[in-house]
Image (cartoon, rainbow, N blue to C red):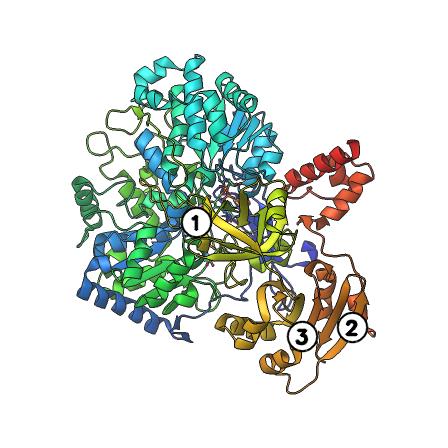
Amino acid sequence: MALTELFSARKSCTTCPYCGVGCGVAATQALQPGDGDPVIRIQGDEQHPANHGKLCVKGSSLADTLGNHGRLLKPQLHGSDCDWDTALDYAASKLRATIDEYGPDSVAFYLSGQLLTEDYYVANKLMKGFIGTANVDTNSRLCMSSAVAAYKRALGADAVPCNYEDLDEAELVVLIGSNAAWTHPILFQRMQAGKARLVVVDPRASATSEMADLHLAITPGSDGALFNGLLHYLTEYGALDQTFIDNHTEHFTDALYAAAEWTPEKVAEYCSVALDQLLAFYELFRSTEKAVSFYSQGVNQSSSGTDKNNSIINCHLATGRIGKPGCGPFSITGQPNAMGGREVGGLANMLAAHMDFSDDNINRVGRFWQASNMAKGPGLKAVDLFDAIDSGKVKAVWIMATNPAVSMPDARKVAAALRKCPTVIVSDCVGDTDTARCADLLLPATTWGEKNGTVTNSERRISRQKGFLEIPGEARHDWDIICDVAHRLGYGEAFDYQHPVEIFREHAALSGFENNRAQTRRAFDISALAEISEQEYDHYFTPVQWPVNADNPDGTPRLFSDGDFFTPNGRARFIAVDPQCPKQATGNQYPLVMNSGRLRDQWHTMTRTGRARKLLDHSEAPEVHVHPQEAQKFGIEDAQLVRVESETGQFFGRARVTASQKPGQLFAPIHWSDSLAHNATVSALAVPVTDPFSGQPEFKQMAVNIEPLKAHSYACLLLRTSTATELHSRLQAGDRLLEDTILHWYRVPVEGGYRFELALKQQPDWQAIADKLFNLSGQQLNRQRLQLPSGERWLLHSEQMELLVFTSADWQSLPDRKTLEDALNKPLPEVPAQLLQNVPAGAQMVCTCLQVSRKEIEAAIADGAASVDELGELLGCGTNCGSCKPEISALLNTNLAVAVG
Ligand SMILES: Nc1nc2c(c(=O)[nH]1)N[C@H]1C(S)=C(S)[C@@H](COP(=O)(O)OP(=O)(O)OC[C@H]3O[C@@H](n4cnc5c(=O)[nH]c(N)nc54)[C@H](O)[C@@H]3O)O[C@H]1N2
Ligand SMILES: Nc1nc2c(c(=O)[nH]1)N[C@H]1C(S)=C(S)[C@@H](COP(=O)(O)OP(=O)(O)OC[C@H]3O[C@@H](n4cnc5c(=O)[nH]c(N)nc54)[C@H](O)[C@@H]3O)O[C@H]1N2
Ligand code: SF4
Ligand SMILES: [Mo]
């Protein structure tokens, strides 16, 4: 419907709920005449300094992820709906009884970088000030904790020096363990629009490395050696800023001493990169003053991630490339509010507002909060926390906005620990997650589009998330739920907030409380916002970078310009780094290194992005990337189902045979879970080894084995929602008939229902399955058969088209899924076997926005299209959000190379 036909439209400016770029979003809600649902239009906010109006494919598809389907709309106690009073009384009484009997350290909160700052602040205050334990950890432990620990060691504070304009101005950007083209797309577009040369350090080829001037495919986990080598090279070739080193740093000689043995020759061998490539990188870094190091999970998710971060920071301190435009060590945050969580002190080893557990700080925060029962010291970090739940030391846990049964290392053990934990409370906006299944009490939370508060992005910029949708069912805001429980625990006075601005003001006041050189000088200070009015907060909040205080009332785009750091003596610290190998070592039993990470169009455990059908076009199934040589060695064919095994668990997925991997290494996306597929939780493979300083787990180097799985045949089932739900719950419950028949499954939401893809162990008795599971009341399934050179295909369907089953000897030769999906909502064709005709097999979608497939792009290249722009003009691909441009460019490179070669 054209907007002109709508009689009213309301625009609200908010912030994207996905990655740490923190793009501004303008949501227009247009009411339709009559009773039609409002039409939501999502666009980039042109005024927002993070994105200037642009959005990537996840952001621009936000409207497709809204709606009540699958939402948790009422509290549920032991699987049954209940009212809020019952739910909150239960939560409070269980917490109180556990604390009374076993002490405050027997309870814990596990929070998330996807909460708003206001939610985070009250959760942290309740636990650390009133319940009296610091057992408050967060999924940021799995994400940013090594970056935090390294910044604190080097700079004296968890303070990101850089900002996004540095990316525009840089002449060199070194992306280390970052696939920014997919994970921080708008920043990657900024880098490409800028003048910087790009160097990518990543063991595998990615969409990001495809666009780089230089790609160093180093041995997994060898980054510490690479940057020790760089420090050594910079020293040898006279690139040190000796004045900066002398005046503003300490321990330089220790770091240099540790780096001394890392000659280019030794590094090249250790990291398995060609010496000339290595020298090209070192020389580029040496000769480019404006150099940004942009790093993420490839270095953080490591058992020596803090040291790796410091090895990078060392090179910036040695060259004085920090606190100046266009340069700096830039740790990029993953989640939309990972930074906000760090600000409030949501990690178990922090107290609040960048204060640790020194006696002075405990006293200071205790006075500010007027707290009755301050925590005395650090609490349990995520891995230790779930171990303590497993061993029974922690007996009640409240999990908010995260899915640890999927995302924690040794995920199976985490789920089992939760199942036996006496009290598990889960606050989520959706009802069916792997973690929710372990809960005693489920609390329906509001989510993006409904929530109201602040988030801080990767460049320390605080922006507003604003609610513009009606709150569905009985969902409530996370901060409000926490405060209600605090009231029931008897701490009402300290949690008497009516509006998030009141929490924000208190948070801002705490950040400035006794924050000066004489007492504790803390980087995080937003005291200038402590008096903000509700009107300003709701209507005139300009995104601003902290510190925002009396000295910098308009915020601070760049830190450390004066060379003054947050250490006691004001000097930044070099850290001597002794590079370590991954702790999950390969050997005979587990000879391969398994890497894990993100896909372009999905967000984590897919509870939101998985709702948008089009976001599954890019990749719809759990998969494992394998080098052709390795595939041959293990007898694996492309698209075949494989089983990956480690010391802790197993993972099933389809093989993607690709030279983007190196031999000896595998890669799997992290997004699938037991709710969406069978045995598809990658983190089940991770042995929970952690970094000694940060406690961050090693997710990028898991030691595994792989084997092909032979299926008898494959089937694709199309089911209306109710039938699909029935099948899903029987699959989850371990129905015997299904278990005997099905080797692996995954599901995809389609219009009107779901498509299930099955790999089968034996010829299934569909009639028995249908009779038993779908209540067809004796109605016979109709059968059609088509004999093709590739084997036979079957179509089975019920009279009401409740169930359509297509089977075939191999997965790829089943008909095109889009055509089949359409059949679910149409009357059966007169000759049903038509549906079995050889419609082209599923074409991978490259441009999700304009629905342009790889096949179409390749055909256009074959017809002479020779640039991304030309393809955009011809097919439209890449002309909306631009997230797919790196892939289009890669297709051009390969296809033109083939044409020329
Ligand atoms: N599309 C999408 N975007 C996201 C997210 C999402 O779920 N989907 N999640 C957000 C979150 S929370 C985060 S934390 C970020 C993560 O953002 P990134 O860190 O960019 O994403 P990952 O895919 O986890 O890993 C990045 C790269 O590290 C590489 N790597 C693996 N081992 C090594 C190594 O030993 N050394 C080096 N140098 N590199 C290595 C991997 O091959 C991978 O390409 O993404 C954010 N953005
Ligand atoms: N193997 C492997 N494992 C990894 C990683 C990896 O690279 N490899 N990466 C790690 C990293 S960096 C991260 S950040 C984690 C992410 O892992 P998780 O945090 O476990 O994943 P999400 O799917 O983001 O979980 C967020 C949950 O919060 C819910 N939710 C959304 N909005 C709200 C809200 O406003 N309130 C409430 N109460 N709930 C809400 C969502 O429905 C969802 O269930 O995974 C980690 N695990
Ligand atoms: S880059 Fe994409 S996912 Fe990240 S904040 Fe911007 S629109 Fe959202
Ligand atoms: Mo993350």
- Looking at the figure, which quarter contains the C terminus? top right
Q: Earlier in the sequence, mark 3 or mark 1?
A: 1
Q: Nearer the viewer, residue 897 or 403?
A: 897
Q: Name the residue tied to disc 3.
A: 803
Near mark 1 (Cα within 10 A), the count class, few <14, some 14-19 or many ≥20, is some
Residue lying at the far front of the rendered structure: 588
The spot of residue 337 in percent (x, y) is 42, 46
Q: Is residue 17 visible?
A: no
Between 54 and 38, the one lying in front of the other is: 54
According to the picture, the residue beneath numbered tag 1 turns out to be 538
Label 2: which residue? 785
| Residue 75 locus on image (x, y percent) | 40, 70
> Mark 2: which secondary structure?
strand
Q: x and y percent of residue 476 in the render?
A: 41, 63
Q: Where residue 592 appears, x then y in whole percent?
A: 50, 45
Q: Name the amino acid type tagged 3.
A: Leu
Ligand 1 near label 2 (Cβ, under 8 Å)? Answer: no
Residue lying at 59% horizontally and 75% vertically, measured from the top left: 722
In the image, which disc is placed on residue 385? none
* Secondary-structure class at tag 3: strand
Is tag 2's residue or tag 1's residue first in the polypeptide sequence?
1
Q: Is residue 775 left or right of residue 438?
A: right
Q: Say which of marks 2 and 1 sits in front.
A: 2
**Label total for image:** 3
- Which quarter of the image is occupied by the N terminus? bottom right
Mark 3 or 1: in front is: 3
Q: Earlier in the sequence, mark 2 or mark 3?
A: 2
Residue 630, above or below 647: above
Q: Nearer the viewer, residue 404 or 324?
A: 404
**Disc 3 versus disc 1: distance between alpha carbons?**
49 Å
